[in-house]
Image (cartoon, helix red, strand yellow):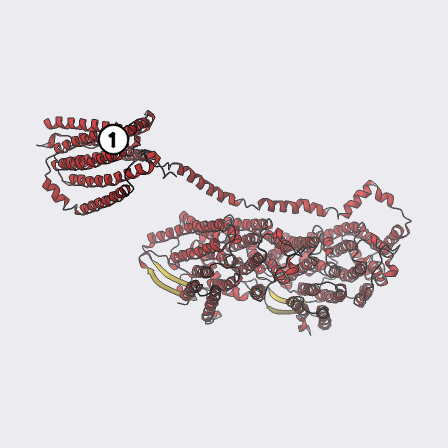
Amino acid sequence: MDGVSIPLDHVLLLSALLFICGLLGLMMRRNVIFILISLEVMLNSSAVAFVAAGARWGQADGQVIFMLILAVAAAEVAVGLGLVIQIQRRFKSLDMDDADRLRG
Amino acid sequence: MLKLLPLIPLFPLVSSVLLMVTTGKMPKRLVAILGAGSVGLSALTTLLVGLAFMESGQPHHQVLWTWMQVGTFSPDIAFYLDGLTLVMMSVITGVGFLIHLFSTEFMEEDVSYSRYFAYLNMFVFAMLILVMADNLLLLYLGWEGVGVCSYLLVGFWYQNPDNGLAARKAFVVTRVGDTAMALGLFLLFTELGTLDIQPMAAAANSQWQVGDTLPVLACLLLLGGAVGKSAQLPLHTWLPDAMAGPTPVSALIHAATMVTAGVYLIARTHELFLLAPPAMLAVALVGLITSLMAAFTALVQHDIKRILAYSTISQIGYMFLALGVGAWTAGIFHLMTHAFFKALLFLGAGAVIHCLHHEHNIFKMGGLRTRLPVAFWSFLIGSAALAALPFTSGFFSKDMILLQAYELPGAGPWLWAGGLLGALLTAIYSFRLVFVVFFGEAKTEPDRQPGLRMAVPLTLLCVLAIIGGWFALPLADVFPVAGEHHPSHLIEGISIAIPLIGLVLAYLIFLSGQLKIDGLVNSSLGRTLKKFWFSGWAMDLLYDRLLVRPYKGLAYMLRGEWVDVIYNSIVKVCQMLFVGLSHTQTGRLRWYATSMVFGVIVVIALLLGVI
Amino acid sequence: MLELILFYMAATIALVSTILALTRVNATHALIYLILSLLAVAVIFYLIGAPFAAVLEVVIYAGAIMVLFVFVIMMLNLGEKGDRREKKLLKPQVWVTPVILALILLVELVLVLSQSAPAETQGLISSKQVGMTLYGPYVLAVEIASMLLMAGLVGAYHLGRRYLEEGGGS
Amino acid sequence: MVLVNLILILLAGGVIAWLAERQHPLLPRWIALFTILFDLGYFLVYMSDLSWSQIAIVPNPSDAATWLFHYKAEWIPRFGISFELAMDGLSLLMVLLTLVLGAVAVSSSWTDIKQRTGFFEANLLWTLAGVLGVFLALDLFLFFLFWEVMLVPMYLMIAIWGHEGRGYASMKFFIFTQVSGLMMLLAILALVMLNHSSTGVYSFSYFDLLDHKVGGDIAYYLMLGFFVAFLVKLPGFPFHTWLPDAHTQAPTAGSVILAGILLKTGAYGLIRFVVPLFPNEALAFSPIAMGLGVAGIIYGAVLALGQDDFKRLVAYSSVSHMGFVLLGVFAWNALALQGAVMQMIAHGFSTAALFMIAGSLQERMHTRDMSKMSGLWQNMPRMGAVAMFFALASLGLPGLGNFVAEFLVLVGLFAVAPWVAAVAALGLIVAAIYSLMMMQRAFQGKPDEGRRFPDYGFREMLTMTVMIVGLIWLGLYPQPVLDTAQPVLDSLMQMVGSVTEPTKVAGLMP
């Protein structure tokens, strides 16, 4: 298995495309679950970029960061889903626009 | 003996402070003794000092302490005694004492008896400082001091807002003049380096030539102060209103002493004025014009005190005329005789008012000749002196002024003619007063007779008003000697005849009624003119429209503080920004995410541009 | 060559399934597509020489985290009504601005990428290497991550407990 | 150490007064009075060691040994910040004024503060401590610190014990002072940085900064930074608008301190810092400064006439009077400078007294509106007489301190800029108008027979007598004050002497 043949640019491009998908989801969806999913996509895409960069230099740092991202994602999902439950209880809806208490 | 000089102002000062500190808790008798007695003591001391001065014949200079000293600016609290000072001091303490004595009875029923004497004594103190001052700054202290006392006394019955207005007017109008004078002081100090009068005169003589601009400017500024204090054009409007004060106050401050301070100032600084002929001419013209205007105004007034007030303005005009033509001694002489007869007239008027339920309108009086004989004789003698009937004191002084005015090369005869017109008018209005008030049928009955403390001062002043013309004033060393004059007999004769003509005219018009002037008075021109003169040539109206109202309007307009508009608009902008920005806080997650993306785009674009 | 083909296939699957996941109305469907996307990414990891990461991606991401999602969605019991409502929210006007912005961003990213010199991934990085690095220079990061996880745990417990105490969802 | 103790005593007294409220609510005012008098006594004891010959030494601004007292301790040596206090004739006068008026201020709020008395007196004492610090500090960092220290307690005094509009007034006061203070801080920092770049050492010390003057355009802006801070405090037109609000709303003691002492810190700053640190720039700026001074004199006087509120009137009169100080400082003339110093002291007395009268009226009538007053003299002759005295002082009656001050300023200014002096002299006329109008509206006119108010009692008369005697003394024998300030001003004149050649002032000559 020699991974020499995969061009880094393409991996990074994939990462960018995934990231933008996540971003679009974040911007368009109002359902809090989909927002969380979008966040996961974005985290994942950045993880791709890290791993690819690590592979480019033959260093393990990229994967280390990937693992940290995993930890962040896990924590985020745990808290985020807890919040989802609270939002559902409070607003009887998952629409984030109903939870606009922060409006100035 | 000369060392007693500082005691003279000290007596009234101490008395005044005592009266102020005890705040009316002193018994009236003691107040009277303290108030009048202190001035009496001053008068006695003045006599002693005067005798000593006559003996030595040398001007006496006495420094008490250095007022302030900054670099070369070091005015002292110091007194200077020469003939001029002595004359002024004698008038102030002498006439002042008589008026204080008169006041002890006149003000008997007033609740603020001790406040009255506190002010009056303070006035005497300030006036003495004014005339005794060795330098112009100390003179200015006295100058403002008498202004304040005048303010306090005009507004003595403060319960009536009209009196307050009159008092404020008196102070503010004179302050305009005072400020001009202060500027004059600045100029003199800046140019001559001292404010001590004698060194200053010497410095002026050595630094300036006759006809230079600076002395003219300085003298005109000093003249500004003088016209303010002495109620000359264009700052004369306060004096008639100042009659709101108690009548003895009018006699002391607004006839005998304070209003003549301007005359004193010019006489004191005559060496400067001699360097500035245009300023001298200005003094003469101001005096003449004022004197005529005031005389016309006095002709048509109803209020006994206002008539006397305009007459005072007119007479001071004569003094200015005298100073302007260089007749220094004559001016001071007239100052003195005027102090006698005008104090007499005012006190006489005071007696009439006192005994007549505070009636001021002369057309509501009449026939008082038999009912108030003391007042009648005072008025008669006073009016005779005022009109300059021969052998009264006023005759000598006024005659001297007119003759010296005639001598002046150039404008002399014109000034003389103007002066004669004034003398004619003076005779007419003064005897109009006498005839209307004391002859004819009685309209109001007096409810009392003047007591001893009123009668004695009146009598003494009557004597002074008659014999005052024979006094020899010790002014020879003070003023430059006037040239010998040889007036023709014609000129002299006219001067004597004019007042008599005026007397006869007044008799014919106001007493016998043989000369009918109703037609003249009731014609439209006559009515307009009468109204115009009655209002004091509409000067009050002019100032009201030109200065008072615009200033008040300005103050009212600005009171909301427009500068704050700037700061408030800064606040407004901040608030608008706040409101605007708070709209971006929609609370919507998508909106925040979108804005973040937008920001990221911008940042990356910037980076790309840089890369 | 095979790797390259595999890579492009996996990349296509990842992209398509992600797009599908984000456009679903039903949350459960979306999750299935997301798992598919994650698996595809795992393949890519494997291909670029990071087998350990690939394994973690499958086990933790696609396994643990997504299961968590599924549990919650089941707990919320959204059903048909939620789907209809969700459909209404996906109106075209909601799309326009985000899409434009996303496109601009994409262009920018591509520009950035095009400026870097072409390079390729190289060699395999063993799990040993990763482990050495992780517990070597990055040990502090591990500590921080552990604290983060702890905080997440506590937070999730706290939020969830109140829900349970108050008697469950609607 | 004397100087440090002077400040510490006040700070400690404040703490004690605060704590003492728990024992008895009336105790703090006695503690405050005692603290100030003790401080004054302590200072006088040390001052009595000074001889006139010592005071007459012209202090060399860059040689600390020529100053009367000097104290220096390291504070933050890394940035050249030290705890440096020093006193010369000018600060001596200011310290005396502060302590005397401080005692007067305590007396003026003897009865009208009923809530949280302890904290009030504590704030009062802390303000005084801050003011003393400002007058004594010679380290610019320390100076700025004290500048803020005096601000905060004053803000609290207005915000807590003020009248109906206190929120707005105190905020306005705070923001004006704070913003201008920030400008000064920027200028200080820039000055230190410039000094650092030329000498290589950081130093906030006045002496060091004096030795290395900055030049060029930047110096002009730095001068403006200082100038604006001091002008706001002075207050000079057009930065005066906080003053009427703050004065009107402050409790009596607050007004007394504000008018009597705090405003003087602005004037002091001009003399101590702006002119010596930036002589060239200040000279170039002086036409504008004079213009602002004259504008302040006239504007303040006009607005004073338009006011119904007794305190607002007095506040605007302050604006007018402080214009003379500005003129005096920027006339570049020994006479005018002396006048400015005299005005600082005389105005402190006269305006403080007028504010006390306003406070007494407010306490008795519960209004400051002069349209609701009339003929008060009838009921309160003593208060009326006192008010008359201070009204006359305020309009510049010769024989009282204000006249000496204004006359010296004008006579000095006249030599430099006659036309400016002529316009400023109009201030004498308009001052008469508003002062007398104030007397007329409040004390004269028809008395309201239905209402009776208690006249001044012993405590009030005692306080007022102190001020009256002070003003008469300043008016008739100001020499001790002049002599004390003279050496300082001489050194100032020497310092600027090199730049004030007649040719440079020529623009102002006729």
Where on the picture, by quarter, is residue D59? bottom left
Query: Please, what secondary structure does the residue beneath circle 1 have?
Result: helix
Q: Position of residue A4 (x, y in %)?
A: 11, 32
Q: Quadrant of the C terminus of chain B?
A: top left
Q: Position of residue D469 (x, y in %)?
A: 57, 66
Q: Position of residue C24 (x, y in %)?
A: 25, 27
Where on the picture, by quarter, is residue B592? top left
Asked if residue B144 can be seen in this view, the reply is: no
- Subunit ID for the residue under disc 1: C
Depth order, front residue of D26/B404: D26
Depth order, front residue of B594/B296: B594
Q: How many numbered marks are there?
A: 1
Where on the picture, by quarter, is residue D12? bottom left
Seen in the image, is B369 located left or right of residue C5? right
Asked if residue A36 can be seen in this view, the reply is: yes
Q: Residues within 10 Å of mark 1 (few under 14, many from 20)?
A: many
User: Would you place residue D103 above or below residue C149 in this image?
Assistant: below
> Residue at coordinates 13% horizontally, 33% vertically from top-left?
C48
Q: Quadrant of the N terminus of chain B?
A: bottom right
Residue farthest along the bottom direction in this orientation:
B1
Amino acid type, mark 1: Ala
User: Would you place residue D56 above or below residue B485 in this image?
Assistant: below
Residue farthest along the front direction in this orientation:
C167
Depth order, front residue of B434/B416: B434
Seen in the image, is D56 located left or right of residue B581? right
> Residue at coordinates 35% horizontally, 35% vertically from top-left?
A98
Which residue matches tag 1? C27
Residue farthest along the top direction in this orientation:
C92
Seen in the image, is D128 located left or right of residue B527? left
Q: Position of residue B459 (x, y in %)?
A: 82, 66
